[in-house]
Amino acid sequence: MSVLDTIARPYAKAIFELAIENQSIEKWKKTLIFINEIIRSKKIEKFLSGSLSPSYLSSFFIFVAGDHIDKDARNLIKLLAENQRFKIFNNILRQFLKLETSYQGNTIIELISAYSLQEHEIIDIRCILQKIFLSKIKFIYKIDHQILDGIIIKKADTVFDFSVRSYLKQLSDVLNF
């Protein structure tokens, strides 16, 4: 897990707990996606990376967001500006989405392969993992040609590395290359 994810986790958890308390998970999800889109805008991105005061920055951001955000979201923006956390907002959003998925009884698995897997292969992997983790599986699927062949399965801090690159590294370590 990256340092940015570690920093983002308490923010996402607090937002998610508020969303559960107010029965507004879907509303918060839409709000966070909306805020993320604003932050990712090239013009706004440059503005956010400047050296503006937190109060001016939050006021500007709230002005840009307009009526699309409520009081709680405005407070979040003020907190992010005060703590200079706009740069990790995408991580906050990802952590929130992971919490939502877990809350719905799903397990998020990051599946990385060297090439595009066929549908039946993904289904087979999903079935095996559902038996192992005893829950529904939701994949975040990525292709990484650097692993040469095979797959890597990540669940939170647990990694199952079945890649050729990993096997070659293990072989190299044994042979002391």
Image (cartoon, rainbow, N blue to C red):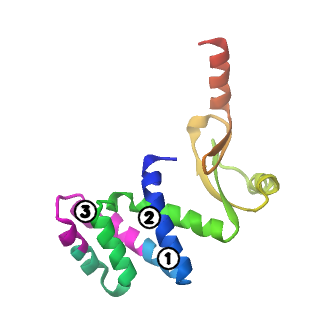
Coordinates of residue 40 in the picture (x, y in percent): 35, 64
Q: Is residue 142 above or below residue 97?
A: above
- Label 3 neighbour load within 10 Å: few <14, some 14-19, many 20+: many
Residue under label 3, please give it: 48
Coordinates of residue 107 in the picture (x, y in percent): 68, 60
* 36 within the magenta span: yes
- Label 1 neighbour load within 10 Å: few <14, some 14-19, many 20+: some
Foreground of the two, 23 or 113? 23
Element assignment for label 3: helix
Q: Earlier in the sequence, mark 3 or mark 2?
A: 2
Q: Earlier in the sequence, mark 2 or mark 1?
A: 2
Identity of the residue drawn at 28% across and 66% down: 81
Coordinates of residue 82 in the picture (x, y in percent): 27, 65
Three-letter residue code for mark 2: Tyr
Foreground of the two, 121 or 64? 64
Residue under label 1, please give it: 18
Three-letter residue code for mark 3: Leu
Whether pointer 2 and pointer 1 mark residues with C-beta atoms closer than 8 Å, the reply is no
Q: CA distance from mark 3 to mark 2?
A: 19 Å
Res 41 visible: no
Element assignment for label 2: helix
Coordinates of residue 38 in the picture (x, y in percent): 34, 71
Whether pointer 3 and pointer 2 mark residues with C-beta atoms closer than 8 Å, the reply is no
In this picture, residue 120 sits left or right of residue 64? right
Q: CA distance from mark 2 to mark 1?
A: 11 Å
In this picture, residue 122 sits left or right of residue 8? right
Q: CA distance from mark 3 to mark 1?
A: 26 Å
Residue under label 2, please give it: 11
Q: Quadrant of residue 21?
A: bottom right
Q: Is residue 103 above or below residue 117?
A: below
Whether pointer 3 and pointer 1 mark residues with C-beta atoms closer than 8 Å, the reply is no
